[in-house]
């Protein structure tokens, strides 16, 4: 689904896109000053080729951020996913306006996502506030500025981002006009293009919504094809996600809907964990193994993390 006219201010989308473009044009040393290898919370800048999806390197670079929180010392953890709480890394000296522009976008999309969440509940015949408890006070949304870079593949089998499902509740994605995003609808084998529509948000179901609807709504596997050598593609993702400690339980469905709710799609490589913090940790450890090994080596064995998605 793609959503237009969702309440962006005049010029807001253009400003966001231009600000993001300027970030990726900063000197490499300014971007590396925010290297996510230094963040135990998986926040900051990931260099080209240092993210792994479906067991392979992605031809993209990115800036990851989330709710600004103090680091929680280990002694205060009730579960390992508390390591995801912490401060962001913003380019405040090299590009001071980025933080403000991006956080205004996150605030807008939090409102849009809340409204969508209410609409989804109503469309399932449930009270609008059905899912509110899972988000109350501390939704663990996160955001990602992404630039895909067309590499001279030299016969290598490159991917923009490899096949995966999003592990939050809903994803709201703004893509530029380059194209390359594809999804595989449930129980189908072919990939379908998700064409760029100007000023539209691509809305994607995340694994937590699949859990909550017992598979009536499916979190589709999607990917981005590599850009042609010498070209780039830009996207800005907002992952609307519950509190880290929220466990999503299947909601009651009418018999008509329940007949189309076969349960959650899991594979050996992708267990879907109903407590959001566990599911998020699975995702971060899998896609940023260098950060995990550097800061959390002792946790690697205890988490259900395997290489790929498929
Ligand atoms: O860049 C895109 O269009 C998709 C990005 C994506 O699927 C992700 O980061 O989870
Ligand atoms: Fe995704």
Image (cartoon, helix red, strand yellow):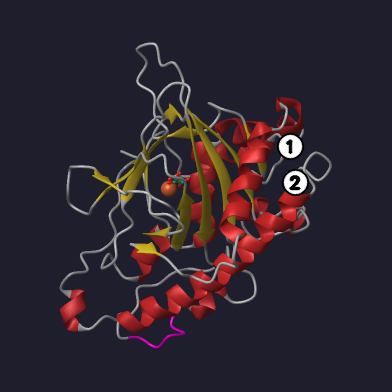
In the displayed orientation, state which residue is furthest to the bottom.
Answer: 127
Q: Position of residue 220 (x, y in %)?
A: 31, 53
Q: 88 or 112, which is in the foreground?
A: 112
Q: Is residue 158 magenta?
A: no
Q: Position of residue 254 (x, y in %)?
A: 22, 83
Name the residue that disc number 2 marks: 90
Relative vertical location of residue 161 with respect to residue 252 in this rendering, above or below: above
* Label 2 element class: loop
**Residue at position x 39%, y 66% from top?**
209
In the displayed orientation, state which residue is furthest to the top.
Answer: 154
The reply to whether residue 87 is visible in this rendering is no
Name the residue that disc number 1 marks: 34
Q: Is residue 54 left or right of residue 301?
A: left
Tell me if the residue at label 2 has its CB under 8 Å from ligand 1.
no
Q: Position of residue 168 (x, y in %)?
A: 47, 58
For the record, the magenta segment spans 126-130
Q: 225 or 195, which is in the foreground?
A: 195
Q: Is residue 127 magenta?
A: yes
Q: Quadrant of residue 157?
A: top left
Q: Is residue 29 left or right of residue 131?
A: right
Q: Is residue 202 left or right of residue 29?
A: left
Disc 1 to disc 2, C-alpha distance: 7 Å
Classify mark 2: residues with Cα within 10 Å, few (<14), some (14-19) or many (20+): many
In the displayed orientation, state which residue is furthest to the front.
Answer: 10
The reply to whether residue 284 is visible in this rendering is yes
Q: Position of residue 268 (x, y in %)?
A: 31, 42
Answer yes or no: do the residues labelled 1 and 2 have beta carbons within 8 Å? Answer: yes
* Label 1 element class: loop
Q: Quadrant of the C terminus?
A: top left
Q: Quadrant of the N terminus?
A: bottom left
Relative vertical location of residue 273 with respect to residue 47 in this rendering, above or below: below
**Residue at position x 53%, y 26% from top?**
49
């Amino acid at each position: 689904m793609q959503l237009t006219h969702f309440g962006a201010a005049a010029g807001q989308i253009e400003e966001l896109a231009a600000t993001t473009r300027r970030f990726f044009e900063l000197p490499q040393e300014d971007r590396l000053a925010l290297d996510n290898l230094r963040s135990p919370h998986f926040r900051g800048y990931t260099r080209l080729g240092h993210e792994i999806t479906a067991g392979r390197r992605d031809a993209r670079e990115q800036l990851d951020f989330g709710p600004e929180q103090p680091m929680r010392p280990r002694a205060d953890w009730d579960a390992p996913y508390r390591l995801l709480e912490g401060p962001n890394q913003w380019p405040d000296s090299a590009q001071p306006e980025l933080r403000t522009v991006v956080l205004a976008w996150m605030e807008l999309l939090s409102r849009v996502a809340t409204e969508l969440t209410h609409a989804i509940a109503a469309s399932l015949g449930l009270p609008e506030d059905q899912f509110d408890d899972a988000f109350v006070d501390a939704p663990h949304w996160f955001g990602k500025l992404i630039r895909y870079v067309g590499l001279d593949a030299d016969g290598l089998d490159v991917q923009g981002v490899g096949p995966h499902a999003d592990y939050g509740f809903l994803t709201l994605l703004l893509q530029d006009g380059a194209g390359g995003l594809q999804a595989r609808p449930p129980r189908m084998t072919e990939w379908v293009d998700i064409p760029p529509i100007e000023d539209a948000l691509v809305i994607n179901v995340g694994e937590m919504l699949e859990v909550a609807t017992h598979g009536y709504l499916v979190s589709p596997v999607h990917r981005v094809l590599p850009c042609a050598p010498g070209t780039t593609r830009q996207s800005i993702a907002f992952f609307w996600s519950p509190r880290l400690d929220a466990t999503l339980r299947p909601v009651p469905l009418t018999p008509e809907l329940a007949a189309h709710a076969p349960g959650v799609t899991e594979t050996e490589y992708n267990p879907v964990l109903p407590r959001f913090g566990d599911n998020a940790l699975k995702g971060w450890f899998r896609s940023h193994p260098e950060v995990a090994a550097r800061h959390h080596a002792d946790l690697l064995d205890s988490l259900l993390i395997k290489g790929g998605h498929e």
